[in-house]
Image (tube, grey):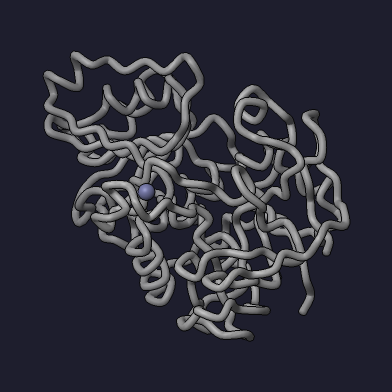
Amino acid sequence: MRALVKAEPAPGLELKDVATPEPGPDEVRIRVRLAAVCGTDLHIYDWDEWAQSTIEPPLVVGHEFMGIVDAVGDRVASVAVGDRVAGEGHIVCGTCRNCRAGRHHLCRATQGIGVNRSGAFADYIVLPEENVYSLPNSVPDEIAAILDPLGNAVHTALSFDLVGEDVLITGAGPIGQMAVAICRHAGARHVVITDPVEARLDRAWKMGATRAVTPGAGVIDAVMSELEMVEGFDVGLEMSGHPDGLADMIDSMIHGGKVALLGLFGNDAHVDLNQVILKGLTLKGIYGREMFETWHKALAMLGTGLDVTPTITHRFPLDRFEDAFSVLSSGEASKVVLEVSAR
Ligand SMILES: [Zn+2]
């Protein structure tokens, strides 16, 4: 089969012929139809410090995808050949304390497809049965291909009660953009989002932001006063991974406010802990998706009018992967979809 492979410990990726994987007794093989490129894939392509310390070549990359079940192991009962599915890319150990308590998203030994094991930028991928998620007909292929990052946004946004609340989102990448639509859908009052890139703010407006603004001194205070907000934001969603984004957020929270942190920081993260303490803030780290409550919520909201299509900006066949990575890397794109198989 064709697969996009990190073949050597060096920048770049190669489209290669590799062996088609066979499913074990509890596994499902999926013919990948559409996949989407994530920031993580860009790190792997660029072979930055994180990638060098995490990835062991050769590795088939990619973790956001949807497709059609192509073969199932003897013991698989919940899906059948021909089913249209997406896949949860975090494979958990099943035996640690959290796994045994049903808190799979907190597994201490999670393996990620396209990071620690074979990924989805390939004609076929094999996953454990429990990681395969059947899709309702109402969800189009393109949206099904981005359920992984949508799930990140859903998990982060729904961490705290949003009904009637004022939400500040720092960072308007694809997940920040989708979080705007989710907060709207879930009944927030004002949803304010910040990002230095104009094109991202445009898409955040399309998603229903109350205000989408370039961050800077006094900007959030000015927005609050326009919106007649006096005490600060009730809920914060940190999606920039930038120290200034986090600092702005901590400054702008109401006493007793709640902050969910999704963006990963470099070595320069700094939190004014005295503000956290004196304001009585709650900080919650978010990784991945709750398995599978987040999936249920995401699909339920998509079925009741949540629209995240503005975040998909580009589509390329798999063999044009260099173009896909280059538009993403230029900052021009938001979500980039790869057409793996036409069938
Ligand atoms: Zn575990």
Question: At 83% from the left edge and 60% from the top edge, which residue is drawn?
Answer: 2
Question: Where in the figure is residue 320, as x and y percent of width and height?
Answer: 86, 54
Q: Is residue 323 left or right of residue 283?
A: right
Question: Image quadrant for the N terminus?
Answer: bottom right
Residue 226's image quarter?
A: top left
Q: Is residue 153 left or right of residue 12?
A: left
Question: Where in the figure is residue 238, as x and y percent of width and height?
Answer: 38, 35
Q: Is residue 112 left or right of residue 108?
A: right
* Residue 122 in sight here: yes
- Residues 186 and 10: in front is 10
Question: Where in the figure is residue 106, as x and y percent of width and height?
Answer: 33, 46
Question: Image quadrant for the C terminus?
Answer: bottom right
Question: At 77% from the left edge and 49% from the top edge, which residue is drawn?
Answer: 324
- Residues 49 and 311: in front is 49
Question: At 56% from the left edge and 60% from the top edge, which residue is drawn?
Answer: 146
- Residues 255 and 74: in front is 74
Question: At 18% from the left edge and 35% from the top edge, which residue is drawn?
Answer: 257
Question: Where in the figure is residue 231, as x and y percent of width and height?
Answer: 15, 31
Q: Please give the count of numbered marks on the rendered protein.
A: 0
Relative to 337, is 252 above or below? above
* Residue 138 in sight here: no
Q: Is residue 171 left or right of residue 292?
A: right
